[in-house]
Image (cartoon, grey):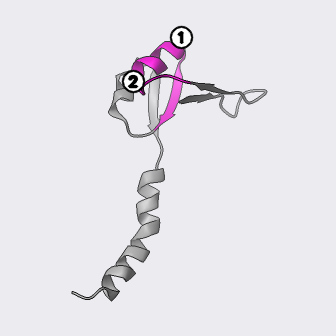
Amino acid sequence: MWLYRTGRDGESPIALYEYQPSRKAEHAAKFLDGFSGYLHTDGYQGYHKLPGNIWVAGYWAHARRKFDEAPTIGRARQRSPD
């Protein structure tokens, strides 16, 4: 499922969901034809094949989660017997 959303500078926010059978970058390229701006995505490398007028901006949710889990994991390892 692809989600396209307008930025904060728009008059009214728009969110569009589009089903595609895969997450290939060609789907985003077709939908975003003529668009120039940022595409906020996960870390899938296929998105970096989009035209040069589309800049891929990744999100940090996966990395942040590891930082949130680190104190818990560290305590669990300290308690577990060897």
Percent coordinates x, y for residue 38 in the rendering? 52, 29
**Residue 53 at what x, y percent from top left?**
46, 19
Point 47% across, 66% down: residue: 68
Q: Is residue 39 magenta?
A: yes
Instruction: Decide whether residue 25 is among the magenta residues.
Output: yes
Q: Secondary structure at mark 1?
A: loop
19 sits to left or right of 74: right
**Image height of 1 relative to 64, above or below:** above
Q: Is residue 20 depicted above or below 78 in this figure? A: above
Under mark 2, the amino acid is Lys
The residue nearer to you, when weighing 21 against 44, is 21
Q: Please give the name of the residue rendered at 65% of the width and 31% of the height, measured from the top-left corner.
A: 7
Q: Which mark is residue 24?
A: 2
Query: Is residue 12 shown left or right of residue 78?
Result: right
Q: Which residues are magenta?
A: 19-41
The numbered mark at residue 34 is 1
Mark 2: few, some, or many residues within 10 Å (few <14, many ≥20)?
Answer: some
